[in-house]
Each structure stands twice: as structure tokens, then as C-alpha cells.
């Protein structure tokens, strides 16, 4: 993150600075940070850890792409077989999310 000009010493300042150009992923970044801290105390499960990793990956992708907030219409891509998926998640990850949501509702 320091290579992109963001302070690395203070999480809150870093998150505030990120939110200017990356509002959606910043929200996910804050949630991932909360999960990581709870994990240190042993209070999270595997699903929460998976969500944190996915959120961190979305942030890295947004920073590497140099794009702004990832909420635009161009946020959806199409796979080689025509499957549509969000830019920050592969088609397989989205399938896993849908499966997890169905299991949660059941």
C-alpha cells in the first residue's frame, strides 16, 4: 500500500484515504480488518476468514487496477463460457457465495 502512496502506520488514516477513490472496497477492507483482529483472539470461523481474504483481494485488485470505486456498471465481467461475474470475484467464488447463502438460509 505504501507503493501506492497510502500511509501504512495508521489503519484508520489509511482506510480514510482509501475511501476517497475506493469506497466499496474500503468498507470490505474495514470488515476484513475486524475479522483479522477477531481471528487473533480465536473468535472467527473458516467462512469469516474466507470473506476476509476475498475482501483483501478485492482491495489489492482495485489498487493494482488504479480504478476508483468498484460500484460502476463495468464491475461485471463475462467468463469465456458466458458466465457473468463481479470483477473482484471469480465465477467459482461467486458460486461458492451463492451456495453459502443457500446453506445459511436452509
Image (cartoon, rainbow, N blue to C red):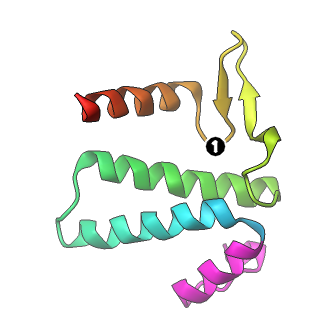
Q: In the image, is 12 to the left or to the right of 87? A: left
Residue 21 position, x and y percent, is 78, 69
What is the quadrant of the N terminus in the image?
bottom right
Q: Residue at x 44, y 65 (%)?
A: 31
Vertical placement of 35 versus 46: above or below? below
Residue at 32% from the left image edge and 52% from the top image edge: 48
Q: Quadrant of residue 83?
A: top right
The residue pinned by badge 1 equals: 88
Vertical comparison of 91 with 33: above or below = above
Secondary structure, magenta segment, majority class: helix
Residue 75 image point, x, y percent: 75, 41
Q: Which residues are magenta?
A: 1-20
**For this view, does 20 lie left or right of residue 42?**
right
Magenta segment includes 49: no
**Numbered disc 1: secondary structure:** loop
Q: Residue at x 74, y 29 (%)?
A: 77
Considering the image in quadrants, where does the C terminus appear? top left
Task: Write the residue at 73% across / 34% down.
Answer: 76
All told, the count of numbered labels is 1
* Left or right, 42 with reference to 5: left
Please state which of residues 95 and 1 is positioned toward the viewer in this rendering.
95
Q: Residues within 10 Å of mark 1 (few under 14, many from 20)?
A: many
Please say whether residue 13 is one of the residues in the magenta stretch: yes
Quarter of image, res 5: bottom right
Give the residue at the far front of this rendering: 105
Above/below status of 70 relative to 14:
above
The residue at the far top in this view is 81
* Residue 32, horizontal then vertical, whole percent: 44, 63
Q: Looking at this view, is 4 or 14 the one in front?
A: 14
Amino acid at each position: 500500500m505504501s507503493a501506492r502512496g497510502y500511509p501504512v502506520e495508521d489503519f484508520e488514516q489509511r482506510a480514510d484515504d482509501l475511501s476517497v477513490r475506493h469506497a466499496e472496497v474500503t468498507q470490505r477492507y474495514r470488515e476484513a480488518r475486524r475479522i483479522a483482529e477477531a481471528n487473533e483472539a480465536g473468535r472467527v470461523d473458516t467462512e469469516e476468514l474466507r470473506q476476509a481474504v476475498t475482501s483483501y483481494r478485492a482491495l489489492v485488485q482495485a489498487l493494482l487496477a488504479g480504478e476508483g470505486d468498484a460500484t460502476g456498471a463495468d464491475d461485471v465481467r463475462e467468463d469465456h463460457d458466458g458466465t457473468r461475474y463481479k470483477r473482484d470475484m471469480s465465477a467459482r467464488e461467486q458460486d461458492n457465495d451463492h451456495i453459502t447463502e443457500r446453506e445459511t438460509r436452509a
